[in-house]
Amino acid sequence: MAIERTLSIIKPDAVAKNVIGQIYSRFEGAGLKVIAARMTWLSEQEAGQFYAVHKERPFFKDLVSFMTSGPVMIQCLEGENAIAKNRELMGATDPKKAEKGTIRADFAESIDANAVHGSDAPETAAVEVAFFFPGMNTYAGR
Ligand code: UDP
């Protein structure tokens, strides 16, 4: 199986709930390593650029304002099938539809405040990891 890297963000709602550690435990329990991390408060420009693919969607403005409403914890995760594994741990975008035991089912309130972000494919993972951690977008085979 392929060793991959993916970008994960613990969003402002989950940081405010004080569950960074519980979410990290889930990464670790699933064999995903945190290989880079940065806690920051995103600017409107950064959030808008990061979510540029959603620029035309009706929820874009609210999404940017939510993502800039408080600090976020951003990490690069590495492991076998890291991209799909992280998406599995996260659960569906809408926490009401997320499977029991997933991060969103357990910690998220709504489709807009849904606790975590995770890259959804190798192409987006490469771009998103490089966005926050320049030079770390590919697997270096350490
Ligand atoms: N989002 C929202 N309303 C919607 C759909 C999405 O606020 O109706 C937000 C939500 O925070 C989601 C993000 O936009 O996590 C990106 O949407 P996407 O469909 O890519 O979901 P994800 O990959 O995060 O599960």
Image: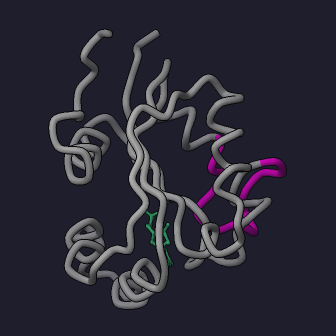
Dividing the picture into quarters, in which one does residue 50 lie? bottom left
As drawn, is 130 to the left or to the right of 120? left
Dividing the picture into quarters, in which one does residue 12 lie? bottom right
Q: Position of residue 126 (x, y in %)?
A: 24, 39
Number of marks in the image?
0
Residue 45, compared with residue 97, is above or below; it is: below
108 in magenta:
no
Q: Position of residue 98 (x, y in %)?
A: 72, 57
Dividing the picture into quarters, in which one does residue 55 lie? bottom left
Q: Position of residue 95 (x, y in %)?
A: 70, 66
Quadrant in which the C terminus is drawn: top left
As drawn, is 110 to the left or to the right of 62? right
Residue 9, compared with residue 7, is above or below; it is: below
- Magenta stretch mostly in which secondary structure? loop
Magenta stretch in the rendered image: 89-101
* Residue under the point 72% across and 76% down: 109
Closer to us: 43 or 83? 43
Closer to us: 37 or 1? 37
Residue 70, compared with residue 129, is above or below; it is: below
* Residue under the point 23% across and 72% down: 46
